[in-house]
Amino acid sequence: MANKKSTIHDIARALGVTASTVSRALNNNPRISEEMRRQVREVAARLGYEPNHIASALRRGHTDIIGVIVPTANRSFFANVVRGVQAIAQTAGYNVIICQSNDSSTEEANIIDALLRLRVDGIIASIARETRQFVHFRKVRQKGIPLVLFDRVNEDIGASTVVIDDQLGAYQATQHLVQQGYRRIGHFAGPQHLNIYKYRLRGYTDALEVAGMAVDGRLICTGNLDVADGRRYMESLLALSEPPDAIFSASDYAAVGAMQVLKERGISVPQDFGIVGFANELFTSFTDPGLSTVDQHSERMGEFAARLFLEEIESGAEAFLPHKTVLTPTLIVRGSSRRR
Amino acid sequence: MANKKSTIHDIARALGVTASTVSRALNNNPRISEEMRRQVREVAARLGYEPNHIASALRRGHTDIIGVIVPTANRSFFANVVRGVQAIAQTAGYNVIICQSNDSSTEEANIIDALLRLRVDGIIASIARETRQFVHFRKVRQKGIPLVLFDRVNEDIGASTVVIDDQLGAYQATQHLVQQGYRRIGHFAGPQHLNIYKYRLRGYTDALEVAGMAVDGRLICTGNLDVADGRRYMESLLALSEPPDAIFSASDYAAVGAMQVLKERGISVPQDFGIVGFANELFTSFTDPGLSTVDQHSERMGEFAARLFLEEIESGAEAFLPHKTVLTPTLIVRGSSRRR
DNA sequence: CGCCATTGCGCAATCGTTTGCGCAAATCTA
DNA sequence: TAGATTTGCGCAAACGATTGCGCAATGGCG
């Protein structure tokens, strides 16, 4: 690059050898003597040489970079997944860069374009909430770039996926509320075009059926599951002629909103109303009472995603068979649902 | 890159022109006719051509990438700063990539090396908690790469900085506790090698002095300010012969820990004990009572940081004079300190 | 001694895009 | 009409690192 920085040519000149010798020495090629390697390293350090990864990537045909796309970085779930990805990928020599889509399909597509132009070696992503068409993800597959989806996935893209067993997690949460003696259990559901929320709803209905309780559609509220949504749903559920006495929420945020409304109404949690959320966000132990929730083993999820990526790299895009890894969730019981 | 992907040579061949014409057409060079441009775009779309940003970056000498280094991505403060950076940088044609240092000086140095090798156009960073030596940041300056530090900064590096007025924020928080009638105010301080915590301590002592209250060293606890630290400090402060009746904590996390202990001890917040945190983390409105705190205008901070970067790019590293932007904090009063 | 293998390097081309300079044709102006 | 300017392209080199192939020197073995 056209500035004052040293290149391997500067090192080569200083030692009276060629650039190819310098390159091989720096890469520990066995065809270069140990003495030459030592001299090259010494001059490189003296000149403050910094390898140009751009040039190297262009010549080699790969960048050793994995792009990770998260909907929003400030959820501890996503931050922990990234941490898991980093632990595995960095050991294998890859650099991990994070991009946040802000849950926007447009931003997600722009990020994918930028990553493709950057020629990343692979993409690990959780789909933005807004996304309903998957053209941009299919493009990744068509270009033979490894793609691994986690948590929010779409199974028609032909990518490998790592998910939690959302249905089981929801089943456990709802069953727990049944066991705590709650008799009329509602559900805050997310947008049903996203698999995770569809399965969480299914786990909820499963548990009700097993417990011999009818599924009452009036007790199911669907939306974006933020705090304000949670507040609104709680208000409307409490206005029913037969309000519920517990809620399984597909998101910790909406669960917090519900808790706020109950507090304001003087309704006692967990004595008169039980609440379980989902995702074990960092703040679930900060509320009062602590919020029961389902843990998604986010860091493990990240590790699995990174391993799937490495597998695909090793076997080559044509030989690789996309597959799905399903992790088992863990119910975390705190004060919000502990009546017995 | 040596795979089946199209290059500008494929387009050139299809149109019977040279690669330089294709390149100029794709970049809307006025020396290429509108008709030729149209044809080039059509063939490019038909062939699924994706520009190779690696090759372009190597030739042009810059990547149009800004690397943002955050200590940990799951704090909403950092996520919002990144959002602010993205809003400005993307409008100016830059791609923003996020790297998380996990508050480790070693990881931070590795990230900086990777970003330098990638030849990013600039680095925007908040310093990792562990970092006490700044060799890796100085290296960025020496190579003439624009560097902007935000929040956690070091002013000897020669970088531009964007910070909140930590001293003022702390002063406001402590003064508010004084005005609420608390008479013995303690402080959870962070590691004093980090400027932000040093100034927050100074703001605390300033407010006490103005109020005619002595500064009692036994009421000041220093550490990493996580939830567990907050619990520990609260326990030890309550064990004093003269315990405090309020706490200004330099972090919302430690403040939550303190609240948990007070609740367990049956000490009423805010009636018998007042608490104010710092940073307006997402969860501060989820606790019960809601946690008073100081808002740092994180998204604005990100915008300022990005603008400083753009300024440095425009004026060139040699002509640029590093400078410091100080934003004004806002005290957010919630239930934890509202006694009057 | 001659042949083969090993060691340690050099030459030249590659990767994909960009851009300075130059040329030919067309247009404008005195 | 002649000279100057504009338009629209092509040629060739550049960017920095990597790597296949080849060559010379050295050592080992029959």
Image: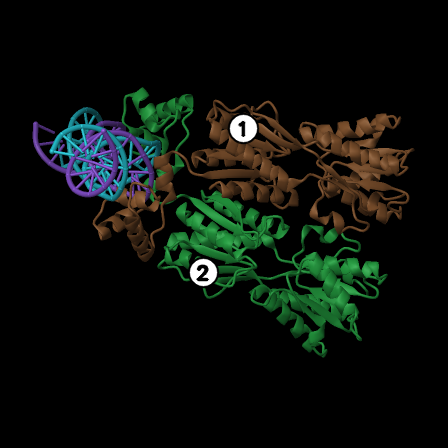
Chain colours: A green, B brown, C purple, D cyan
Percent position of residue A108, x then y: 50, 53
Pick the front one: A202 or B86: B86
Question: Disc 1 marks which amino acid?
Answer: Phe
Crowd band around label 2 with a 10 angstrom C-alpha radius: few (<14), some (14–19), many (20+): many
Q: Give the number of the disc on residue B75.
A: none
Pick the front one: B308 or A35: B308
Name the residue located 68 percent from the left edge and 77 percent from the top edge. A209
Pick the front one: A154 or A330: A154
Percent position of residue A306, x then y: 49, 51
Q: Is residue A179 above or below residue A328?
A: below
As helix, strand or loop, the secondary structure at mark 1 comes to: helix
Q: Quadrant of residue D4?
A: top left
Question: Disc 2 marks which amino acid?
Answer: Ala
Q: CA distance from mark 2 to mark 1?
A: 39 Å
Reading the image, the residue beneath label 1 is B137
Image marks 2 and 1: residues in contact by CB distance under 8 Å: no
Q: Quadrant of the N terminus of chain A?
A: top left
Q: Residue B318, can we see it? A: yes
Q: Give the number of the disc on residue A159.
A: 2
Crowd band around label 1 with a 10 angstrom C-alpha radius: few (<14), some (14–19), many (20+): many
* Left or right of C15 in this view: A160: right
* Left or right of A333 in this view: B305: left
Percent position of residue A169, x then y: 64, 64
Which chain is home to disc 1? Answer: B
Q: Quadrant of residue A267?
A: bottom right
Name the residue located 86 percent from the left edge and 44 percent from the top edge. B338
Q: Residue A119, can we see it? A: no
As helix, strand or loop, the secondary structure at mark 2 comes to: loop
Q: Quadrant of the C terminus of chain A?
A: bottom right
Percent position of residue A266, x then y: 86, 61
Say whether mark 1 and mark 2 are on the same chain: no
* Left or right of A144 in this view: B179: right
